[in-house]
Image (tube, rainbow, N blue to C red):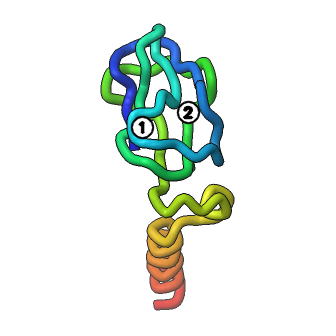
Amino acid sequence: MFRAPGPGKFLNVKRIGDIVQTGNVVATVNDEPVKALIGGVLRGLLRDGTEVYEGMKAGDIDPRSKLENCYSISDKARAIGGGVLEAIMYHFNR
């Protein structure tokens, strides 16, 4: 994960699916670089031109470096979705 270093306009340097190394510039905010904190595949990224505030989550890096993980649901999201579905089923089938 990486965050905006300050307020301003977020501009992409890299794209989702790109492999990055620690310290690579993935974007800029008002010409200030946003650097990858870990190496891996760029899995999430704010839309180019998004207005951000300091500390705002701006993207995500998957250290497993598998490109196919960029285009599928994560294990965490699948578990949360399953829990929500279970709660809905319980609510309507009491």
Residue 3 falls in image quadrant: top left
Mark 2 is surrounded, within 10 Å at the Cα level, by few (under 14), some (14 to 19) or many (20 or more) other residues, namely: some
Q: Tell which of 92 and 58 is nearer to you.
A: 58
Identify the residue at image location x=40%, y=44%.
Answer: 1
Q: Amino acid at mark 2?
A: Leu
SS assignment at label 2: loop
Camera-side mark, 1 or 2: 1
Whole-percent x, y for residue 37 in the image: 35, 40
Q: Amino acid at mark 1?
A: Ala
In terms of sequence position, does the residue under pointer 1 or pointer 2 come before the other?
1
Q: Tell which of 39 and 83 is nearer to you.
A: 39
Say if 33 sits above or below 59 in the image: above
Q: Is residue 78 left or right of residue 2?
A: right
Mark 1 is surrounded, within 10 Å at the Cα level, by few (under 14), some (14 to 19) or many (20 or more) other residues, namely: many
Gap between marks 1 and 2 measured at Cα: 14 Å
Q: Which residue position is annotated with label 2?
A: 46
SS assignment at label 1: loop
Say if 48 sits above or below 22 in the image: above
Identify the residue at image location x=56%, y=33%.
Answer: 46
Q: Tell which of 59 and 50 is nearer to you.
A: 59
Q: Which residue position is annotated with label 1?
A: 36
Whole-percent x, y for residue 16 in the image: 63, 43
- Farthest top residue in view: 30
Say if 11 sits above or below 56 in the image: above
Identify the residue at image location x=51%, y=78%.
Answer: 82
Identify the residue at image location x=44%, y=48%.
Answer: 39
